Amino acid sequence: MNNPYLPQAYKILEIRKETAIDYTFKVAFQGNVIGGQFMEISIPGVGEAPISICNFDKTSLEMTIRRVGRLTDKIFNLQAGDSLFMRGPYGNGFDTNIFKNKDVAFIAGGTGLAPIRKTIDHFMTGIDETKILEVLVGFKSPSDRLFIDDLDRWSKFGNVTVTVDKGDDTWQGETGLITTHIGKLDLSNVKEKIAVVVGPPIMMKFTTLELIKNGFKEENIWVSFERKMSCGIGKCGHCKIDETYICLDGPVFNYIKAKTLID
């Protein structure tokens, strides 16, 4: 009998430190994956949690995990060659066809960059698929930045803005909240421009409001919910808002739908 809750053990190929509390785990995996989907990862006897897939190819996938509690403490003690238990992938992910031949702005706050990293990379390496490609990312401080090498590489292909809430003595980049940089995007074709917004709820709320204020159409805004999705298969109802299961129907939603999903 097939048990959908039963995880499988996958070999950890590499562990890469992003920040003091964020590590990226590269795990052997063969299967169909869409950018924006998530896995349920677990340690037997300890617990399970949903983690966004931030990168993948035909033989592996990567997940950036923040050390925040008992489960992640155990995971951070693992080494390359050890096994990580996983089930998935789950969720709808991003339909890249939506963005082709469009002006697109990917906007992320903090760890919200992880779920859209693969999708951004797809268009950065296939730049001709979009007209104007912009990335706007905000972190609390320079030491909280994720995927620094990717951000540098992407800046060679598209317009990449990295801002921090508060810089330090070495920071020479942008400062200020993401909302203060929305008006600096290329808005020459704003009525047709697409925006993707991922991050903490408060960041997403005020960023989408600022986008609309600057002329973006609601139907051209896409968001991805970072929400506690316990089972991942629409059984437990933990992530349910009204009649919508975030784990099944999302986590990627058009803003027209997303704005109705209020706890």
Image (spheres, rainbow, N blue to C red):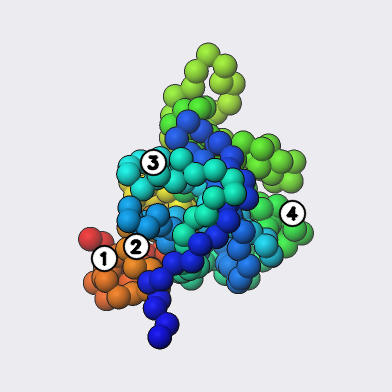
Q: Secondary structure at mark 4?
A: loop
Q: Which residue is mark 3?
A: 73
The CA span between labels 3 and 2 is 20 Å
Asked if the residue at tag 2 contacts the one at tag 4, i.e. Cβ–Cβ closer than 8 Å, the answer is: no
Q: Residues within 10 Å of mark 3 (few under 14, many from 20)?
A: few
Against 87, is 73 above or below? above
Q: Mark 1 sits on what residue?
A: 238
Other residues around mark 1 within 10 Å, as few (<14) / some (14–19) / many (≥20): some
Residue flagged by tag 3: what amino acid is it? Asp
Q: Are marks 4 and 3 in contact (CB under 8 Å)?
A: no
Q: Which residue is mark 4?
A: 125
Along the polypeptide, which appears first: circle 4 or circle 2?
A: 4
Q: Which residue lies at the image location 46% right of the left edge and 40% below the top edge?
A: 77
Residue 12 appears in the rendering: yes
On the image, the x and y values in percent for residue 65 come to 46, 46
Q: Nearer the viewer, residue 204 or 85?
A: 85
Amino acid type, residue under disc 4 in the picture = Thr
Task: In the rendered view, tell whether residue 110 sits above or below residue 46.
Answer: above
Chain-order first, disc 4 or disc 3:
3
Tell me the quadrant of the picture where the C terminus can be found: bottom left
- The residue located at (51%, 41%) in the rendering is 23
Is residue 119 at least partly visible in the picture? no
Q: Secondary structure at mark 2?
A: loop
> Which quarter of the figure has residue 193?
bottom right
Task: Look at 54% across and 65% down and name the residue there.
Answer: 94
Q: What is the C-alpha distance between the residues marked 4 and 3? A: 35 Å
Q: Residue at x 44, y 24 (%)?
A: 166
Q: Badges 1 and 2: C-beta atoms under 8 Å apart?
A: yes
Residue bearing the label numbered 2: 229
Position above or below: 213 against 56: above
Residue in the foreground of this view, choosing between 26 and 97: 26
Residue situated furthest bottom in the rendering: 1
